[in-house]
Image (cartoon, grey):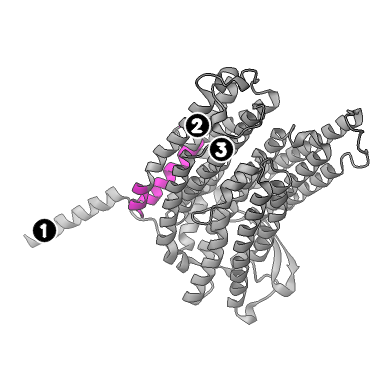
Amino acid sequence: MSTGFPWLTVLIVWPLVAAAATALTGVGRGRPAAGAVTGAGRFGAGTARTVALVGALVEVALLVGAFAAFDTGDAGTHQLTETHSWIPALGASYAVGVDGVGLLLVALSVGLVPLVILAAWKEQGGDHAKLRRYLATVLVLEAFMVTVFAARDVFLFYVVFEAMLIPAYFLIGGFGQGPQRRYAAVKFLLFSLAGGLVMLVGVIALYLQVPAGDRGPATFLTDNLTGLALDPTAEKLMFCAFFLAFAIKAPMFPVHSWLPDVTQNATPGTSTLLICVLDKVGTFGMLTLCLPLFPEASRWAAPFVVVLAVISILYGAILAIGQSDVLRLIGYTSVSHFGFIILGIFTFTSLGTAGSGLMMLNHGISTGALFLIAGFAIARHPRQSQLIGDYGGLRKVAPILGGTFLVAGLSAASLPGLATFVSEIMVFLGSYSRWPAAVLVAVPAVVLAAVYVLLTYQRMFTGATTPELESARDLDGREKTVAGVLVGALLVLGLVPGPVLDYVRAPGEVSVQQVGETDPPPVIQSSAADAASSAATEGSQL
């Protein structure tokens, strides 16, 4: 459904305008002499931050307008659509539109950016030029993130999928804080490029599957490529090409090894955007491209994917327990959580798929809270240490910091009443009706999550206060705003999930229909029906 106002295009273009304004702030002011602190320098740095923050908040206001124009009663269809010819010779179009899940992920992208800007208010060592470049790059990445979740043309999706690597690479390697940030950036780039090149082969092969007479300026539209009569072998190969690219991005075992290196060496704000938003492109692509474009191959690969998802769930949780670096630990928790999302997608049940869509949102909020609040703790250490063993008793001197970290951690552990619990239980219930063994094997990860969250909290925030942290201050007003918004969102989504469920329920049902499956009957109901049938048979024999 199209509206008169191009909401999605404006949401894509505005961050680029804000990025340009931020990048140009302070240009031409000159560099102050060594040791000098000039009024212009202070004004320039403050202006860059203010321009970036105002630009991000205007984007939030535009998002509110997009939500107002979206019909939740028809959340399973793509709305706010726009289609314009882009490269007619290739059959590519500028086509955007969102269903309920896509709109929630756009909201996640737009909502986290101003919080990341606030969290990075004093980062980059006070270097104004570096700070404004960092903020401008964040805003450019925001435009790409909105585009990729709204793209309804496979070629457009692929181009943005690859283009996002450029700002992401610079955010890790150019603005990271770890000693191996360049290594982590190159590793991220190589993994992502390898997956992207394989996906490009799949995109070309998919184009060639369209009969020559049917190719036109809108060939790559997702709707036009859905339902093609594909050769079974070709469909499986194309599915594998797309799935590999998405599994690397997700990240999923065994192609996840770039993730902990990135989280250890990037800033907490960068990790928030990469892990909590950018990596959702992987699971979003599985849901919106792999399932509708390759339904037979999706069913063929489901057992293998479910096994890998369960391995990811347990593997990520176990390795998180053994980490000594708090940011690396949070990275491994995401490997586990992405396993839950993928499990729900490939169970082909409306409840499980809807739970996965909701978990993409909830994971982004809870893990983003963990990254940013852990970053506040690291900023209070005299050596900016990320090692868990260098902390202790921080709750006594910074109780608000300790409390918000605990709430974010408990949400990651799916405590009832917090956001992630709702989506995780939906995935479990939806998956059990089709893959009960997988669910039973994955359930211990819930206990493991409680272990790594509580153990980390105990080591960092309880006990005697480390001498280096005795003078540490609690969260200031800016930091309280960031933590308060995220913790508030976790509580609202955990206690009142109904309104958000309206956005994921219908897309879940549509995805199951697209892959040619139906929801299995409830286990209890099925058992009762079998018993009744057996009793009827015995009665007829008598």
| Front position in the image: 448 or 211 | 448
Q: Decide whether the magenta segment is chiefly helix, strand or loop.
A: helix
Start-end of magenta stretch: 417-441
In space, the residues marked 2 and 3 are separated at their CA atoms by: 10 Å
Provide residue 498's location: percent of width, then percent of height: 50, 38
In space, the residues marked 3 and 1 are separated at their CA atoms by: 64 Å
Q: Quarter holding the C terminus?
A: bottom left
Which mark sits nearer the N-terminus, 1 or 2? 2
187 up-or-down from 109: above or below: below
| Circle 1: residue type | Glu
Provide residue 324's location: percent of width, then percent of height: 53, 37
Identify the residue position indicated by label 1 in the image. Answer: 538
Marks 1, 2: nearer the viewer:
2
Residue 390 visible here: yes
Identify the residue at horizontal 47%, vertical 39% (top origin). 322
Provide residue 87's location: percent of width, then percent of height: 74, 69
| Front position in the image: 475 or 390 | 390
Identify the residue position indicated by label 2 in the image. Answer: 456
